[in-house]
Amino acid sequence: MQKRKRELDVAKNITDAEAIVIEVFSQLKDNHGMYGGIDTSYKYKRTSAERFFSPAILEEYKKPRDVKTMMLSGNIAYYKMPAVIVGSDTVQMRYWANRLTDSLCKLEQQLPAAYIIDLRMNNGGNIEPMWQALKGLIGEENKTIMVDAYGKIVPEDMDSASLLYRATAIPDRSCTFRKNMKVAVLVGPGTASSGEIIAASFTTRKQTRLFGERTIGVANVTQGFILQNKGYLLLTVAYIASKKKKPMTEGIIQPNEYVKSETDNYTHPEQDPTVLAALKWLTK
């Protein structure tokens, strides 16, 4: 590592420097991070089974991201939470916090018997608006924690700037959820990053069961670094762990009930195989 640092110190141009950064970064085998430079980029590709996306998922990706809600048979509330790809734009964070929360509150006003939370199209982004919308249903006590490579808890930043930043994701309105309701959470190959972390929080909630397929496997914490205003390096800096303090080193969320669905139906969820499996459990 010291050798590479010395090489960086004497690099004659940005191209030579980028080559060194990418070489070092590749050795980390960080499949969540990436490097983006002026005219080059790099992302480590983990060797694993190829993800299969149903035609319905691929078609759904073409549409604008938004929440989908409806009431299903048995008085079951269906809530599809999209990814929140807004970076650190605080205005957009507040917009999505309100959008996600208001949609969920409208469902709760109908006094559903149980919930289906669909995270199969949630491939991550800014987790703060997602957590603020769902924390009343998940329970604060089930929020995941950060741990380092040795399993030691990494405390959240509590400085004024961090607190102010997170406060921008607090919605203008909130609602109260009834206790001990059954919740079915849907996950799959399209569930990634922040979407996986939200799913992980549900794994320790009582009266909750996950349905679908395994997630992509990047349920961990990243941090971005600007390199001399000419490059951007995204690094994985911590694992996540459930409230039981068990580190999820693989970053994969496994469902309780596997449903191999090649006929997902996001237009008519009541015809979706994974939704039907969840409804069967919820209405027992």
Image (tube, rainbow, N blue to C red):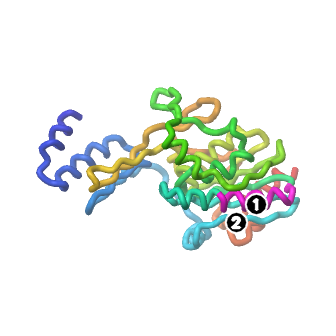
The quarter holding residue 67 reads bottom right
Q: Position of residue 95 (x, y in %)?
A: 60, 61
Residue depicted at 29% across the width and 54% down the height:
231
Look at the magenta stretch and give its main secondary structure.
helix
For the question of whether residue 11 can be seen, the reply is yes
Asked whether disc 2 touches disc 1, contact meaning CB atoms under 8 Å apart, the reply is yes
Dot 1 alpha-carbon crowd within 10 angstroms: few under 14, some 14 to 19, many 20 or more: many
From which residue to which does the magenta span run?
98-112
Q: How many marks?
A: 2
Q: Which residue is mark 1?
A: 78
For the question of whether residue 260 can be seen, the reply is no
From the image, which quarter does the N terminus lie in? top left
Tell me the kind of residue under disc 2. Answer: Lys
The correct choice, above or below, for 56 with respect to 49 in the image is below
Going by the image, does 246 lie left or right of 270? left
Which element type, helix, strand or loop, lies under badge 2?
strand
The correct choice, above or below, for 170 with respect to 244 in the image is below
The quarter holding residue 243 reads top right
Dot 2 alpha-carbon crowd within 10 angstroms: few under 14, some 14 to 19, many 20 or more: some
Residue depicted at 16% across the width and 42% down the height:
9
Q: Position of residue 200 (x, y in %)?
A: 62, 43
Q: Position of residue 105 (x, y in %)?
A: 77, 57
Q: Which residue is mark 2?
A: 68
Mark found first going from the N terminus, 2 or 1: 2
Along the viewing direction, whichever of 51 and 33 lies nearer the viewer: 33
| Magenta-span inclusion, residue 105 | yes
Residue depicted at 55% across the width and 73% down the height:
62
Q: CA distance from mark 2 to mark 1?
A: 8 Å
Along the viewing direction, whichever of 16 and 253 lies nearer the viewer: 16
The correct choice, above or below, for 9 with respect to 70 in the image is above
